[in-house]
Image: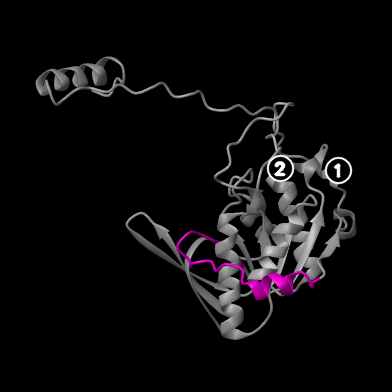
Amino acid sequence: MCVLMAHVPDTASAVKVGPGGDRIDETGLKWIVSPYDEFALEEALKLKEAHAGSVTVVAYGPERVAAGLRECLARGADTAAHIAGGDAVFGDALAIARVLAAAVERLGPFDLIFTGVKGVGSDNSLVPAMVAEFLDLPHVSGVVKLDVGGDGLTAQREIEGGYEVVESPLPCVLAAHKGLNEPRYPSLKGIMAAKRVQIQTLSPAELGLDESGLAGNGARCRWRSLELPPAKAGGAILDGQSDPVGAAKELVRLLREQAKAV
């Protein structure tokens, strides 16, 4: 099994726009395994424990990605591969998917390729489906329940008012959603063992890809600028204890004239 991992800013971080205006300011940011990829990794580990096999984690990005791969190894993954680069194709989901698909082909074959339903960053939930398309494999997104047996799988996806049941042959690309499982924490034993595992490092060129070409005329998406949302105005506090009738009238007025809600 293979798990595709994105290394993203901690979701609790205060994001600032960088000096160039088209990237975030990475100064002082803490980087983590993308939360949805944690569900993907945990499901792969559960299947490994139930049916044997091994788990390989793959990530594409700069040097810091190795720390995320080490964490995945500490949680129970067997091997890890770092595709070094990514800065030139920032925000281009198609280019990222092309590199990851090439890595899967190089390192595989795999019966299952897991991803999170989205990387908490810039992929817009596009990468999993694009990887599946490049690999010419079936793809199930938003998986919240999974049963694997024989040559196929049955997955459930949460939809409004119920669940959608999807069956697929293997191999398959699966995008995990919140609720699929409860990710484990790295154990001390796992952390120590992960330090001894050698992470395989590859470049896009070694996968037969020209990263500069992907970022040049081949790019489908370029980030022009970023800006933070406008600061919210302070709220109004109405004294409904001493004058409840007056407070109710004032609330209706504010809803009608300012909020335009009634």
Nearer-the-camera pick, 116 or 161: 116
Quadrant including the C terminus: top left
Location of residue 42 by image quarter: bottom right
According to the picture, the residue beneath numbered tag 2 turns out to be: 92
Magenta range is 173-197
Nearer-the-camera pick, 232 or 167: 232
Quadrant including the N terminus: bottom right
Location of residue 48 by image quarter: bottom right
Q: Secondary structure under badge 1?
A: helix
User: Amino acid type of disc 2?
Assistant: Asp
According to the picture, the residue beneath numbered tag 1 turns out to be: 213
Residue at the (55%, 63%) spot, across then down: 39
Nearer-the-camera pick, 35 or 98: 35
Disc marking residue 259: none
User: Amino acid type of disc 1?
Assistant: Gly
Mark 1 or mark 2: name the one nearer the start of the chain.
2
Does 223 appear above or below 104?
above
* Residue 211 % position (x, y): 85, 47
- Tell me if mark 2 has few (under 14), some (14-19) or many (20+) residues whose alpha carbon lies within 10 angstroms of its own: many
* Residue 59 % position (x, y): 73, 58
Q: How is the image coloured?
A: one colour
Q: How far apart are labels 1 and 2 at the CA level?
A: 13 Å
Q: Secondary structure under badge 2?
A: loop
Nearer-the-camera pick, 33 or 91: 33
* Residue 138 % position (x, y): 61, 65
Residue at the (31%, 16%) spot, across then down: 258
Task: Examine the rendering and report whether any part of residue 139 can be seen.
Answer: no
176 drawn magenta: yes
